[in-house]
Image: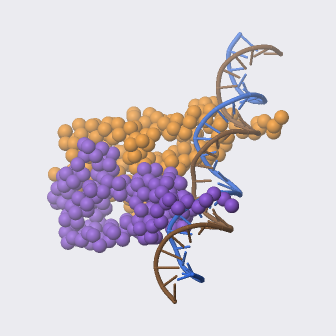
Chain colours: A purple, B orange, C blue, D brown
Amino acid sequence: MGQPFRRDRARLPAAERRKQIVEVTSRLIAEYGFWGLSMQDVADGCGLTVPGLLHHVGSKEGLLIAVLDERDKSDMSELKAEKLQDLCAALVRRNARQPEIVRLFAVLEAESLAPDHPVHDYFRTREKRAIDSFTELAGGDEALARQVIAMMDGLQIQWLRNPVKVDLVKAWDDAADRLFSK
Amino acid sequence: MGQPFRRDRARLPAAERRKQIVEVTSRLIAEYGFWGLSMQDVADGCGLTVPGLLHHVGSKEGLLIAVLDERDKSDMSELKAEKLQDLCAALVRRNARQPEIVRLFAVLEAESLAPDHPVHDYFRTREKRAIDSFTELAGGDEALARQVIAMMDGLQIQWLRNPVKVDLVKAWDDAADRLFSK
DNA sequence: CCTTGTACCTAGTAGGCACTCAGTAAGCCG
DNA sequence: CGGCTTACTGAGTGCCTACTAGGTACAAGG
């Protein structure tokens, strides 16, 4: 009984499928936020049915966590520097090449300000980690660390809204001149 | 036929009801974003049915526009200053007293980065207006204007995420010292 | 060849979504 | 009192939501 089972879809190994799912989801969250994200759209984007998608991530929240985990993993080992100024310069230059991911984080960062958003805590600890390491590189000046992060976040938003007019790297280098001039 | 018509709800004049709707909607958008906002929740928050709500705003998008219009109106005439530094100080001090509204704009600003978000254009022109007037006050230094706005936006996010630890006014005054030191 | 694991399916559930229609009653003007 | 406007209602439409139950077919290992 029931319709014949469809066999025209690709059957991928779990790791590969997961990677695809993360990629598609990132794009959609950047577009609609987590509350506006629909499992159906993610499934469609992967050429799957919704239950097929749920087989991999378990639930909508599991999907979100998969995305952030993946991102953190690839992030961790990529950036190292000894001077705060150099770290920022590298960070900004990398981000300038990945507008989609920057937008994903910008949207999620704002949305998750609400205390009961599923990744509210994730973003709090993420910020704390960033502040701590920046403060250390700034010789203990936490105020400067916070200003640097605020400036990067703010310029990124302006860049995302107007990529033609705003050159992220140049805008940051200008800002860094002022911030680090002393 | 049908249930007896309920007469236990307040019947408000349109202007008053509209004001209430805007207030409730602002709070909910700050919490869930526009894509996560539901007409049902807004109606509940006002003690109305959904069609009752639609009678006033027409559609979900009309609701959003009502919110932004209202805000702009009350904003326009409130702030005037001759030096950029003074304007920022006043702005930050007022915002520090309205975390809900600041969060509404933070969420909407990020969400509306997507080009087909219903208020994408609104936020682009809003930013342009801000940049232009800040640039003028900065003696034509647009880079500085952008940095000032970026810093304010960024610090506001940190403050909203951690209102206990971050004192917005103090954080801004520190930042202003550095930005305007020259 | 046969078994086991697993990637993915169809079908269905219970509820939520924005929005429409047609009607009702409250408030104001004469 | 009568008539008009309008704030608001209940009922309903068609579609979308996340998620579940149970089954199917492919692939690898014994």
Q: What residue do we see at 52% from left, 35% from top? A: B62
**Residue B96 at x, y = what percent?**
41, 51
Name the one closer to the observer, B158 or A99: A99
B52 on left or right of C25: left
Quarter holding residue B4: top right
Q: Measuring from the top left, give residue A175's x and y in whole percent.
A: 21, 53
- Quarter of the image for the C terminus of chain A: give it: bottom left
Residue A24 position within the rendered picture, expressed as x and y whole percent measured from the top left: 42, 57
Side of B34 where A146 appears, left or right: left
Which residue corresponds to the image point at 25% horizontal and 60% vertical from the top-left?
Answer: A94
- Residue found at x 40% / y 46%: B114
Above or below: residue A158 compared with residue B133: below
Q: Nearer the viewer, residue B5 or B12?
A: B5
Residue at image point 28% right, 37% down: B133
Q: Is residue B106 visible?
A: no
Q: Is residue A125 left or right of residue B31?
A: left
Q: Which quarter of the figure is the N terminus of chain A placed in? A: bottom right
Q: Does residue B76 appear in the picture of this structure?
A: yes
Q: On the image, which quarter does residue A68 sit in?
A: bottom left
